[in-house]
Amino acid sequence: MPKLTDTQLMLLSKATQQDGLLVIPANLKGAAATKVVKPLLAHGLVKEVPSKPDTPAWRRDETEGQSYALVITRDGRRAINAEDAGEEPDPPKPAPKAKRPAKAAAQKSAKSTRASEPRAGSKLALVIKLLTAARGATLDAIVKATGWLPHTTRAALTGLRKRGYRIEKEKRTDGQTAYRIVGGSKKAARKSRKAG
């Protein structure tokens, strides 16, 4: 068992009183927060879970566009002698899946692309509509249309690439850079054009 600092012990103790949620105090920021949390993660005393809108996030992955919260694990409860007698153990980690034949993998990929199409009327659907226009759209135009910050907009473009959209970047004659969808989920692109 690792030797825990007073701060780490306090955070784990408070987590047991907050439905297992580890909340980083406001006075613990940046590198200091990371220095406290990383050993807890490394020893399995806490784990990262995708955060919900009402859950305080400890970090945000801009490339995935996902925020993560920290929850105490059973080992974390044991470390501070706070394990309940009737508590369920942490679920075992799933075994790695066997490799699928190429055809099955292609079918799964097609299904996941269909499932990952944005909801009609959402901001992401609006971005797709802007990017499917003949001239595409500049980052500034997408920011203005969605109300997002530039880094959020760039993360959304990365997310679309991960969903299978092929996005090209081209320099216009006026010097601005435009982004345009040239491939990917055609079904979603057609829906976006019809919605507008």
Image (cartoon, grey):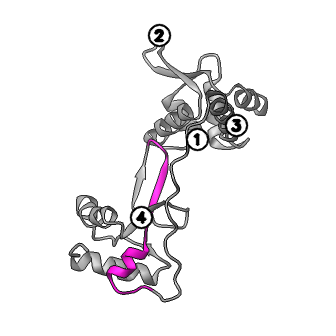
Tag 2: amino acid: Thr
State the residue position of label 2.
173
- Contact, mark 2 vs mark 3 (Cβ under 8 Å): no
Residue 53 versus residue 148 in the image, above or below: below
Residue 2 versus residue 113 in the image, above or below: below
Q: Secondary structure at mark 4?
A: strand
Q: Which mark is residue 47?
A: 4
> Mark 1 or 2 closer to N-term?
1
Magenta stretch: give its range. Answer: 63-83
> Mark 2 or 3 closer to N-term?
3
Query: Which tag is nearer the camera, tag 3 or tag 1?
Result: 3
Query: Which tag is nearer the camera, tag 4 or tag 2?
Result: 4
Residue drawn 70% across and 25% down? 186
Residue drawn 22% across and 80% down? 6
Q: Secondary structure at mark 1?
A: helix
- Contact, mark 4 vs mark 3 (Cβ under 8 Å): no
- Contact, mark 1 vs mark 4 (Cβ under 8 Å): no
Between the C-alphas of marks 1 and 2, the distance is 25 Å
State the residue position of label 3.
111
- Contact, mark 3 vs mark 1 (Cβ under 8 Å): no
Q: Secondary structure at mark 2?
A: loop
Query: x, y percentage for residue 142?
Result: 55, 33
> Mark 1 or 4 closer to N-term?
4
Res 10 → quadrant: bottom left
Query: Which tag is nearer the camera, tag 1 or tag 4?
Result: 4
The residue lying toward the viewer, choosing from 2 and 53, is 2
Tag 3: amino acid: Lys
Tag 4: amino acid: Lys
